[in-house]
Image (spheres, grey):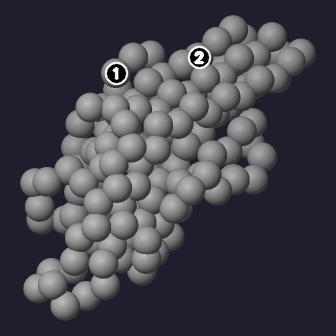
Amino acid sequence: MPGVFLTLVGSAGGSGPAVTITVNPSFVTAFNTLGSPATANISFNSAGTVTEAINGAPATTLYNWCIPASEAANYEIYATLSAGGVSGGSSAFNTWLALSSNRAWQVTTSSGVATAIINVGIRRTGSTDILASADIELYAEST
């Protein structure tokens, strides 16, 4: 189900800090000309942030998916490709991936348009409850 979900949960045993998990619907767009490749990348980082990188430029933080960031390693992400296709180097689909490592998906094209729609969900490791989920659209165009 696409959308923004904010959930407050306690750590195991209820003695730890409250944690806010957020996944925002996102649209990452990259344009390039003269046959140069266009690349749109989104990453859910182990530092608790979501970043975008356009055409190889340094990543820009979009928002914090985990507050406090020190809790990020206790969560996993699941991604499903709803439409289009991703480029090599993208993280896996249809399996839970630990967010103790960065997880990224991208589209790249040297000519024309490349797109992908990805649904992502986040849960606490060891739980079956999805705490937040949303659709992410990646779009790259090179002319």
- Looking at marks 2 and 1 on the same chain, the residue that comes earlier in the sequence is marked by 1
Marker disc for residue 82: 1
Query: Amino acid under label 2?
Result: Ala
Residue at the spot 15% in from the left edge and 84% down from the top edge: 14
Residue at the spot 26% in from the left edge and 32% down from the top edge: 1
In this picture, residue 122 sits left or right of residue 129 = right
Residue at the spot 77% in from the left edge and 23% down from the top edge: 31
Tell me if I can see residue 93 in this picture.
Answer: yes
Which residue is farthest right? 34
Tell me if I can see residue 98 in this picture.
Answer: no
Query: Amino acid under label 1?
Result: Ser
In this picture, residue 79 sits left or right of residue 37 = left
Q: How many numbered markers are drawn? A: 2
Label 2–label 1 contact, CB within 8 A? no
Q: The C terminus appears in which quarter of the rendering?
A: top right
Residue at the spot 51% in from the left edge and 62% down from the top edge: 64
- Residue 46: image quadrant is bottom left
Q: Position of residue 105 (x, y in %)?
A: 49, 39
Q: Secondary structure at mark 2?
A: strand
Which label lies toward us, 2 or 1? Answer: 1
Q: Nearer the viewer, residue 56 or 44?
A: 44
Q: Position of residue 92 (x, y in %)?
A: 34, 40
Q: Position of residue 35 (x, y in %)?
A: 83, 16
Q: Is residue 99 above or below residue 117?
A: below
Q: Position of residue 141 (x, y in %)?
A: 71, 17
Q: Is residue 66 above or below residue 94?
A: below
**Which residue carries the number 2 mark?**
114
Q: Secondary structure at mark 1?
A: strand
For label 1, count other residues whose C-alpha is less than 10 Å away and answer few (under 14), some (14-19) or many (20+).
few
